[in-house]
Structure formats: C-alpha cells, structure tokens
Image: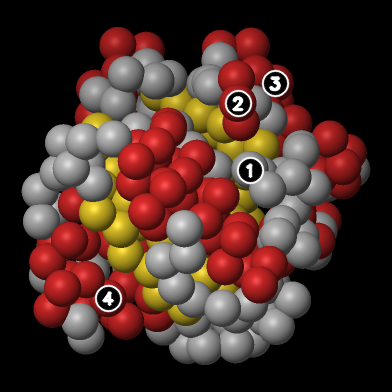
Amino acid sequence: MCVTFLRTCCGVFWSALMAAALATPCVSAATPLSAAAGAAAGVQRIDDYAAASAAARDAGAMLLVSIEPQGGDPNDDAGRRLEQPDVQERFAASGTPWVFCRLGLSDAAALVGDPSLVEMRGGPGLFVVDHAHDPWHGRIVSVLPRTPGKYYRFAPQHLDELASLPPASLTQRSLILAVRIHPEHPQSTQGACDPALCAEAEAHSAHQARIRRQGHHGWDVRSQRIGGSASEVCAESWEHQDLLDSCVDCVASWRQSSGHWRAVSGQHSAYGYDIRRGTNSIWYATGIFR
C-alpha cells in the first residue's frame, strides 16, 4: 500500500510542490560555498529555491534544502554543519553533484505547508530531491524533520548520512538511515544496496501492509527467487506514527531479538530495506540480506 502522502510508492512527484515554491519569496541570490568546497568539490549553494531547483535539474544533481528557524542565522546548527569543509567534502565524494539551498522558515511556508512534506512535521528540517537518478527523478527521497517526534530526534550529524545513502525511494532511504544512526552502528548497510533486494523488500512490506499482519509470508518462494544464502527480518511499528518515528521504532524492535539483530548488525555483501504503512496506521518494515 502506498504511503498516503506519496503519489507513487517510490516517492513524490515534484511538480505541485515546485509550483508552490515558485510563489515563495526568494531568500537571497546564489551564494557560492567556500573555495575549498566550491566548483572542485561539485557542490553549489544557491539560497533561492526556484534557482536551486533549476540548477539541480540542469546538472543532474541532488538538491538538499535546509529550512531553518531563522533565515541566514550563522549559528544555526544544521546550517553550520553544511558549511563545514569536511561535510562538504563528504558530499563531494559521493560521486553525485549536489546543490545546497538554505531557507528561513518564514520564507518557506509554502514548502513546509505542502502535503508532500508532511514528514517535516510542520516545522524546520531538511529534505532531498533527486534530480540525479532516473527512477526517482524529481522526487523527494529524504526528509529529516527538526521537530522532535516520539522516536526520531534530529541531530546535525544525521545530515552527513544524506551524502552516502544509496539511490532509492523515500521509504527505503529513511529505513536505511534509521539503521545507520542506531547508536550501536549496525553493519548491514555497509555492503551494496541491491535494487533487486530493495524490490523484494518493497513488495513484502507492501504485502504485510495490505494484509495488516507482520510475518515472513512466502519466504520459501521469495528466498528461492533471491537465490544464494539469503536472510530476512520483519518488524511493525506502533500505530499512528510518522515515517521516521516508525523506522527508528522498527530498528529498535529488531534490537530486542538476538536473531533479528544478528542479521541487521552483521556484514553482508548486499542488502535491501523498505517500509510501508497499512490502513491500520501501522508501518511494516522488511530487510533482506545476501
């Protein structure tokens, strides 16, 4: 089952949100990053949403938008993090060009209020639009709300992970992020993110959401289709939670089971993760490893 605010199960089309953004007052003209992380690093900073979106589309880049409580605040935690040379170098080393756009919350009201960004929790935060990879072109693939939730609490270092998350959908990248920011640093996402395994995880999460029941239904057939030595973990969230709270919740659930945690924390050559929400407002997560 598709997440209710998505137009497809893989992400959000950007046209409606773009139209709203074009009506948003510009914060500033294009602003270059520091020389150390400028053109040589493949990272641009453009603090005008429409211009940043156009530049990302033209360059086939990832667009990272930081919506901050006060525009231009030099002491903003997320903004300062984006200015650090080591962080900029991390994004530059990702192999994909990036465009950074910093906006104040008052100037980004049309963005934050759009239903496509419900995962921002109505306040400041960061989101990423993928203009670099065809399957998700023009779609939101990451959202980091700065408003605290039940389980997910933003920390500036979380934005570092955005540079190395694999090309994938919003739900897939959110669950992978939740694995990576777990305090025990599980290793299952250090291998290759396999599109075939992600597709299997997507399909099984959707199946669990459809029948509203967690389980390894059909694993005997699925494991044969995957081939090799494969393993799977499943989890469900508490009801009425948003995406990131549910991702963190499911990872915490895996931590409570020695068998599941052995799979999530272990090293694998390939992995796939995904999560889907059922009509019962419960999210169902799947991880598959080979």
Tell me the kind of residue under disc 3.
Ala
Residue 133 visible (yes or no): yes
Lower sequence index among marks 2 and 4: 2
Cβ atoms under marks 1 and 2 closer than 8 Å: yes
Lower sequence index among marks 1 and 2: 1
Element on which disc 3 rests: helix
How packed mark 1 is, by other alpha carbons closer than 10 Å (few <14, some 14-19, many 20 or more), is many
Tell me the kind of residue under disc 4.
Trp
Lower sequence index among marks 3 and 4: 3
Tell me the kind of residue under disc 2.
Pro
Quadrant of the rendered structure where residue 165 is?
Answer: top left
Element on which disc 1 rests: loop
Cβ atoms under marks 3 and 1 closer than 8 Å: no
User: Which quadrant of the figure contains the N terminus?
Assistant: bottom right
How packed mark 3 is, by other alpha carbons closer than 10 Å (few <14, some 14-19, many 20 or more), is few
Element on which disc 2 rests: helix
How far across and how far down the image is residue 273, in percent? 40, 51
How far apart marks 1 and 2 lie (CA) works out to 8 Å
Q: What residue lies at 74% left-to-right and 76% top-to-bottom?
A: 279
How far apart marks 3 and 1 lie (CA) works out to 22 Å
Q: What residue lies at 47% left-to-right and 44% top-to-bottom?
A: 200
Between marks 3 and 1 in the image, the one whose residue lies nearer the viewer? 1
Residue labelled with disc 1:
10
Q: How is the image coloured?
A: secondary structure
Cβ atoms under marks 4 and 1 closer than 8 Å: no
Residue labelled with disc 3:
54
Which label belongs to residue 254? 4
User: Which quadrant of the figure contains the C terminus?
Assistant: top left
How far apart marks 3 and 2 lie (CA) works out to 19 Å
Element on which disc 4 rests: helix
Quadrant of the rendered structure where residue 86 is?
Answer: top left
Residue labelled with disc 2:
135
